[in-house]
Image (cartoon, grey):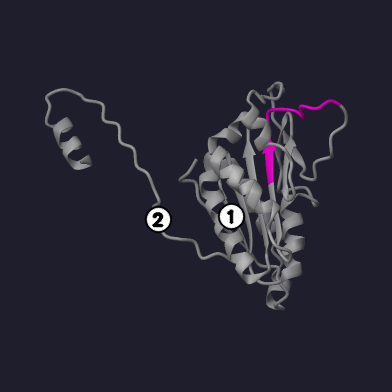
Amino acid sequence: SLFNFVYLATGLNAAVPTSVIFEGPSGKGVQLKTNVLAIGGGTGISHALPVFLQALSEAQQAGMGAVHLCWIIRQARNVEWIAPELTELREDVSTVKSGIDVAVTIYITRETEPQSGDSEEDPVDSKKIENEKQPAVSLDSHSCKQLLTPTPNFRVRYLGHQHPDFAQHEDGALDSWIARAEGYGGSMEVYASGPQNMGRDLRRAVADKNDSRKAFAGKGGNIGFCWDDRFY
């Protein structure tokens, strides 16, 4: 057992490195809102993905809601971190029933579009990553290419030398989700996990989108924000 292992290790008269691995689930469930935007930066997808899946399940039961997921990673091959989950997710979102607005977007910040020619313009404004080069896309396996193939409600955006900037662009992922969520009515919440600077930018962006006049009039305008950095 874990207790016996630690006891034996500490009982020795020498420094013994002790490695411990915990496997979840842990913590309490999240009381989700009608409309959910889940955002994961890097390993922050460990928080965002379960929230998204729960929200999607509840939205399908209710027959309404805007449920979006954004995952921000550095390289294309990072999708293989959650290859089994992503394979199932791609199928789930492509067959979601009508009446629900669902979208999954993966942003790849350090690579450019692998195909030649003009690519579709990304709707999210971006911040330049200073003093960094733009490496070639890292689609080094067949499974990786399959995971990144666009399907209904699932898309990939290569940002090259940039990060998504949710705070400044009026037609970005945040605004797009808000516009769809307001069409359904009900409560709105952003759940996110990732680097601290991402949390800072998102917190500011959500605050800017809140409208106290609409909230007091019962016409929306009140967007919640839940930040969790335990998974990054």
Q: Where residue 133 sits: x, y (%)? A: 70, 21
**Whole-Å distance between the Cαs marked 2 and 1?**
17 Å
Residue at (53% x, 52% y) in the render: 50
Residue type at the position of mark 1: Phe
Residue type at the position of mark 2: Gly
Compare residues 87 and 110 and report the one nearer the observer.
Answer: 87
Q: Where residue 85 sits: x, y (%)? A: 55, 44
Up-down: is 177 above or below 79? below
Q: First in sequence, mark 2 or 1: give its number.
A: 2
Compare residues 186 and 22 and report the one nearer the observer.
Answer: 22
Compare residues 105 and 146 and report the one nearer the observer.
Answer: 146
Task: Judge from the rendering whether residue 178 lies leftward or rightward of residue 46; answer left or right.
Answer: right
* Residue numbers of the magenta segment: 105-116
Q: Which residue ends up furthest to the bottom in the rendered image? A: 217
Q: Main secondary structure of the magenta part?
A: loop
Query: What kind of element bears circle 2?
Result: loop
Q: How many marks?
A: 2
Q: Which label sits on residue 52? A: 1
Residue at (63% x, 71% y) in the render: 62
- Asked where in the image residue 156 lies, by quadrant, the reply is top right
Up-down: is 130 above or below 226? above
Residue at (26% x, 26% y) in the render: 17
Task: Judge from the rendering whether residue 51 lies leftward or rightward of residue 66; answer left or right.
Answer: left
Dots 2, 1 in contact, CB < 8 A: no
Query: What kind of element bears circle 1?
Result: helix
Q: Residues within 10 Å of mark 1 (few under 14, many from 20)?
A: many
Callout in the foreground (2, 1): 1
Q: Where residue 163 sits: x, y (%)? A: 69, 36
Q: Which label sits on residue 27? A: 2
- Asked where in the image residue 138 lies, by quadrant, the reply is top right
Up-down: is 71 above or below 96? above
Residue 206 visible here: yes
